[in-house]
């Protein structure tokens, strides 16, 4: 199963809302409808031929939509502040098989899907980042754990759209103690880890400088200040095999009134000699703090961990 970002935004005529039409009819769809204005395609080969005849090529969006998206794939849509998860069906329709008004909607290609509105509290950082991609259709890279989580959401929200898990923080804490540290980190998106590291450092007296959180300084994730007017710069690396973070590489960024904090999901990241004021955050150190401060889990992450450590 793959996960995709999708946008429904063809060049519809005034008074014809393609997004509303698709949602009401359990479709998702793309434009390029003019290819079928005069001739109805008989099969996939004729679809390709008519697209080339009208547009000189088969648009990559159509290729992904027809060839790459498979039955039961998940397609996420963000529209008017709401998140929708569409579960792909097998059938793809073209031209007038969609609607007699397909040209007015500019819907040349639709796929039958199951629509599910997902409350924002359940939407992980990986999905939230994925849906803002510029392309109309684009694969979102998520872990197997996150795929399992999405399937759980489909199962529960399909039965009751108002469903919310009742989370017992103490039981969650006990559950997390039983999880291997590597597995625990694999359940977290890069945003989740950055949030936890920032909360951890704030508990040590540092305060987040919000204006530094927008990748304006790509070498660090963000910076923080403390009451002594000192600054710290924070580097967080995550993923299956993130690069190492040798403290010596950060020596040039240290001053008499600044520190560097490093965190990586790679246990062997902090290789080489130690450097004064370059401070690694070790796995056990962060996890123990987290277990004592379950409140520091954002609600989407807490919900995800709860669902994945309890049978539903």
Image: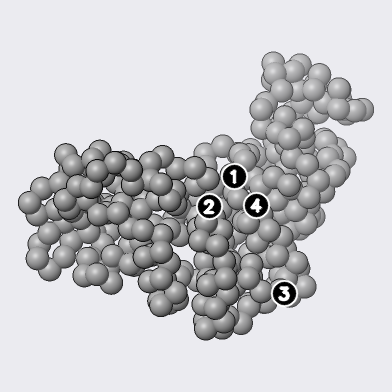
Q: Which of 208 and 6 is in front in this view?
A: 208
**Looking at the picture, how far across and down is residue 303, in whole percent?**
57, 71
Determine whether, in the image, residue 41 is placed left or right of residue 149.
right
User: How far is the residue under mark 3 from the one under mark 4?
Assistant: 18 Å
| Residue 168 seen | yes
Q: Residues within 10 Å of mark 2 (few under 14, many from 20)?
A: some
Residue that label 4 marks: 144
Residue that label 1 marks: 140
Ranked by sequence position, the earlier of labels 2 and 1 is 2
User: How far is the residue under mark 1 from the one under mark 4?
Assistant: 12 Å
Q: How crowded is mark 3: few (under 14 residues within 10 Å), some or many (20 or more)?
A: few
Q: Which of 282 and 185 is in front in this view?
A: 282
Q: Which residue is drawn at 33% across and 58% down?
A: 281
Q: Quadrant of residue 68?
A: top right
Residue that label 2 marks: 126
**Looking at the picture, how far across and down is residue 289, in whole percent?**
38, 71
Q: How crowded is mark 1: few (under 14 residues within 10 Å), some or many (20 or more)?
A: many
Quick one: quadrant of the C terminus?
bottom right
Q: Which residue is drawn at 62% across and 56% down?
A: 146
Could you say whether the residue bearing mark 3 is in a helix, strand or loop? loop
Residue that label 3 marks: 312
Could you say whether the residue bearing mark 2 is in a helix, strand or loop? helix
Q: Quadrant of residue 103?
A: top right
User: How far is the residue under mark 3 from the one under mark 1?
Assistant: 26 Å
Ranked by sequence position, the earlier of labels 3 and 4 is 4
User: How far is the residue under mark 2 from the one under mark 1?
Assistant: 8 Å
């Amino acid at each position: 199963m793959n996960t995709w970002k999708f946008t429904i935004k063809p060049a519809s005529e005034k008074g014809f809302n393609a997004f509303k039409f698709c949602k009401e009819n359990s479709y998702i769809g793309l434009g390029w409808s003019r290819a079928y204005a005069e001739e109805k395609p008989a099969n996939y080969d004729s679809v390709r031929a008519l697209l080339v005849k009208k547009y000189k090529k088969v648009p990559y969006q159509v290729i992904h939509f027809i060839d790459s998206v498979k039955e039961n794939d998940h397609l996420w849509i963000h529209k008017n502040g709401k998140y929708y998860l569409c579960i792909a069906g097998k059938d793809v329709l073209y031209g007038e098989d969609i609607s007699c008004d397909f040209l007015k909607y500019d819907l040349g290609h639709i796929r039958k899907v199951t629509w599910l509105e997902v409350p924002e509290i359940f939407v992980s950082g990986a999905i939230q980042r994925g849906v803002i991609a510029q392309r109309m259709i684009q694969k979102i890279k998520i872990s197997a754990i996150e795929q399992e989580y999405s399937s759980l959401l489909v199962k529960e929200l399909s039965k009751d759209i108002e469903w919310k898990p009742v989370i017992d923080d103490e039981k969650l804490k006990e559950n997390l103690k039983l999880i291997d540290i590597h597995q625990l980190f694999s359940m977290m998106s890069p945003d989740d880890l950055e949030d936890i590291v920032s909360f951890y450092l704030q508990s040590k007296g540092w305060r987040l400088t919000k204006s530094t959180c927008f990748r304006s300084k790509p070498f660090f994730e963000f910076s923080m200040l403390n009451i002594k007017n000192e600054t710290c710069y924070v580097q967080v690396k995550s993923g299956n095999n993130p690069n190492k973070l040798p403290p010596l590489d950060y020596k040039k960024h240290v001053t008499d009134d600044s520190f560097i904090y490093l965190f990586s999901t790679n246990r062997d990241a902090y290789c080489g000699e130690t450097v004064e004021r370059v401070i690694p955050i070790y796995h056990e150190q962060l996890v123990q703090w987290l277990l004592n401060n379950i409140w520091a889990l954002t609600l989407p992450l807490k919900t995800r961990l709860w669902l994945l450590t309890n049978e539903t």
